[in-house]
Amino acid sequence: MTTAKLFQKLSMLLEDTESADAKHIKKLRKVLQKLKKKQKALHETLETAEGEQERRKIKQDIEVLKLQRKKGVRVYKALKAGDVEGEGEGQGSA
Amino acid sequence: MLGRILLPSIFLVLAYGFWVSSSFKDIAAGVALFLFGMLCMEQGFKAYSGGTLQRVLTVSTNRLWKSLSFGVISTTLMQSSSLVSVITISFLSAQLIGLAEGIGIILGANLGTTTGAWLVAGFGLKVNLSAYAMPMLVFGVVFLMQSSKKTKGLGWILVGIGFLFLGIHYMKEGFSAYSQHIDLTQYAMTGVAGLLVFTLIGVVATVVMQSSHATLTLIITALAASQITYENALALAIGANVGTTITAILGSLSANISGKRLAAAHLIFNGVTGLLALVFIRQLLQAVDKISAWVGIAADDHTLKLAVFHTLFNLLGVVVMLPLINRLVSLLQRVLREDKVERDQPRYLSEASLALPDVALEAVLKETRHLFSNAFTVIAHGISLRRATVTGDEDLQFLIEAPVKFIDVNLDDQYVRNIKDIYSANIEFLSRAQAEAPREYAEGYNALRRANLDVVAAIKAVKHLRKNLLPNITSHNSHIRREYNRFRVRIGKVLRALASLRDSDDAVVTLLSLDQVRVEMADAEHNSARVIDKLIREGSISSQVATSLINDGAYVNDVVQRLLNMTEELYRAAIPHDDPVHAELSLQADEIQEIALEVIQDSGAEGPDRS
């Protein structure tokens, strides 16, 4: 194999990795946006909710969304920073 | 019975033919190689027919003209109308397409298959095909040795084309050698009798070989060697067109009612087309002569004229049948009705889809949803709730104090009627599909297997719970009555949450929303434990009743967990196995418990008062 071909193959390999990360970031951003929207809608519902049981359920749902978003933002930042490997292992348990 | 007579008869005829003539051996070997080539090509196209074909199908079959074009193009590319019709049956059985679209594809496939005659008559007979066959076989085998599924598929296609070419070459050689010794045209028949007899021979030959393409190639090569007359060749081609429906009929035997309707439509279409060709044979021949003269085909070039005839009468069939498709659909739906069965049966599984891993996965996914839909009613009835109450808008908390309206059902009987056959069929189908599918599908199939097991385990847990639930929801002790009603509310809430999940939502977002249900259930479980403790301390219930409540609470937890796990598996099967987003964002068990306890402390609510 010539050096030029070797470099070409290597760059193709790197491009693939980049595109996989880009896809991951894109998907993550899309999901985070949807979760944020859901959280906002729940906050609005909470303002008008009166029953104790109903308010309690909404608060729980908001807490779930908050934590999911927090975890997502952490992964998003790690991906953006390029520290995929280290954070990926850390997130394995999440 | 027929098989027992037919197969030995074929062997006897072949053995006799091999004994008396070496040319016959060449022709038979040519047919065998040709059929083997078609099998190789089908194998190769299957590598591309999963996700890609499904994507193409969904965008290309929403309008009739699109499904017609899909049939023409796919059959032209694959050179096998049989493969296209079997794939269409599998898609229809899995309800990925409707009957009208399926018929559109079949009509298109009939037009697409006519390109085969053009290729053989226009190219195959004029070129030394064996010279092209050899390099194709060599390249094909090299591709077959690669590990990539798609490259292997390409290898099978090249090997298939190589064998097709080799088959045509042997048929050609065989007939030209044959013509030096025997003149088969002495058996030619003229007039209506000849037309009917040779049409019948064409039907039988295609039924035996299960390939109209092979029959047509045999006819064209025989015609080129002047071993059959032009008139008889036309009748054979009509017969081949009718005989080719056998593949779809065989493929539909194990399919559901939609598959059977499509096979019937295929038979009606090809039968009507054949009949029209026989009735208007004179007019068609005049048209063939005119068209041939117009496009520059010599008057004595019977092989190309046969290709013109083949295209023309199939086109006539499409033109006649196309406006009648909707009527044909309603006729088939009226005549071929779904059997009314006492026991609910699988709706989406078919033998035909087993060979296509993506379609098989989609079919069993739908069947598992069907199973869950039935289980939903069984579970709701098991805790004396109507399906409408569960799916309605009313706050289920009212059940805690409301007088109970019993739903008198026999759960064992409901299980046999609505669950057992579908569950058994799913497990059998999953085992068979998994054995045939590549390794990357294993996780999807395993997830669906677990989902099926969870559905059934949830029903079993309801059955155990029901023994104490029914007497206690009418107990004179209001505390006991209330706690057992709370169990009903917990299960009802999970069922309602699962029923409200929308397929249109992103699968990952839907999966993440299950965490909210998990927190709600953890909260309810903590509350239940606190209430039972309080009731024991206050002496409101005996320790025996308390332990029953604890044990039955465990059954409730089991039902809830199984239902949530089942839903998670169903949605997980729908997302790519390498998509990490759900795993990264979903909450762990300790996080769920933490939120459940945190909100309790914040709101300061405690004990039975809060409900």
Image: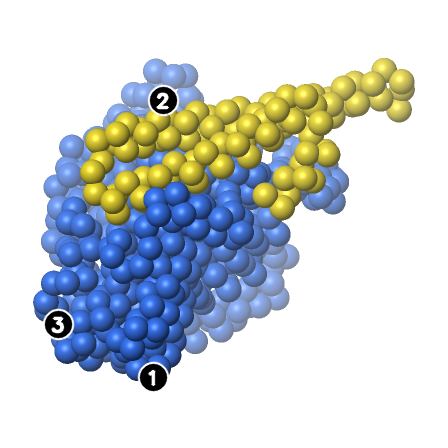
Chain colours: A yellow, B blue
Report the Cα–Cα distance between label 3 and label 1.
Answer: 25 Å
Residue B309 at x, y = what percent? 33, 33
* Residue at horizontal 38 percent and vertical 54 percent from the top: B523
Q: Which of B217 and B396 is in front in this view?
A: B396
Tell me whether marks 1 and 2 sit on the same chain.
Answer: yes
| Residue B456 quadrant | bottom left
Q: Which amino acid does label 1 sit on?
A: Gln
Residue B134 at x, y = what percent? 71, 38
- Along the horizontal axis of the image, is B245 left or right of B570? left
Q: What residue type is labelled 2?
A: Ser
Report the Cα–Cα distance between label 3 and label 2.
Answer: 79 Å
Q: Earlier in the sequence, mark 3 or mark 2?
A: 2
Mark nearest the camera among 1 and 2 is 1
Q: Which of B298 and B385 is in front in this view?
A: B385
**Visible residue check, residue B484:** yes
Q: Residues within 10 Å of mark 1 (few under 14, many from 20)?
A: few
Q: Which residue was labeled with disc 1? A: B544
Q: Which of marks 1 and 2 is nearer the N terminus?
A: 2
Q: Which of A34 and A52 is in front in this view?
A: A52
Q: Which residue was labeled with disc 2? A: B292
Label 3 chain ID: B
Q: Which residue was labeled with disc 3? A: B406
Q: Residues within 10 Å of mark 3 (few under 14, many from 20)?
A: some
